[in-house]
Amino acid sequence: MAHEFGHFLLHHDLQSHTDVGFRVNYRDRKSSEATDIEEIEANFFAASILMPRPFLDRMNAFEALTDDDQVNRLAEIFDVSVHAMSLRLANEYSYQRSF
Ligand SMILES: [Zn+2]
C-alpha cells in the first residue's frame, strides 16, 4: 500500500490506468527489480514510510549491516520482510562502510 501511495503522490500527473482518477501499478517482476524510475521512487517512498531513517538511526541500525541477527530483529520490530529491511539498510548506510 505504501508503494502504491507513493505512486499516487509522486506520479499523479501521469496518465491513469483506471477511470476513477488514480492509477494502480501492480507489483511485478519489473517493480521488484526496480529498473523503472517510477518504481524506484515508489519503492524509496514506501521504505521511508515503513522504515524511517530517524528511527533506524536511533536504533543504531548501521551496525546491522554486518549482523544478520540484527537485520532479522529490525525487520521484526518494523514489521517488514527481512529482504525489505536488508535493502533499506544497504540503501541508507552502505556508503558509510567505506569510511
Ligand atoms: Zn509500482
Image (tube, rainbow, N blue to C red):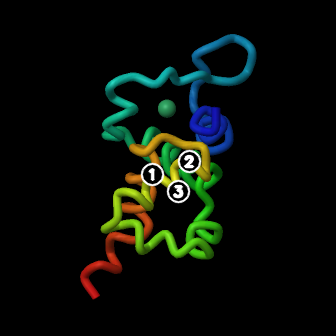
Closest to the observer: 96 or 71? 71
Residue 11 point in image, percent of width and height: 59, 39
Question: CB of residue at label 3: within 8 Å of ligand 1?
Answer: no
Residue 22 point in image, percent of width and height: 69, 24
Residue 67 location, quadrant = bottom left
Residue matched to label 1: 72
The N terminus, quarter of image: top right
Residue 68 location, quadrant = bottom left
Determine contact: label 2, label 1, CB under 8 Å.
yes
Closest to the observer: 36 or 90? 90
Secondary structure of residue under mark 2: helix
Residue at 59% across, 37% down: 7
**Which residue is at the far bottom?**
99
Closest to the observer: 2 or 54? 54
Residue matched to label 2: 76
Secondary structure of residue under mark 3: helix
Residue at 29% across, 78% down: 97
Position of 5 relative to 53 (above/below):
above
Residue matched to label 3: 74
Determine contact: label 1, label 3, CB under 8 Å.
yes
Determine contact: label 3, label 2, CB under 8 Å.
yes
**Which residue is at the far right?**
20
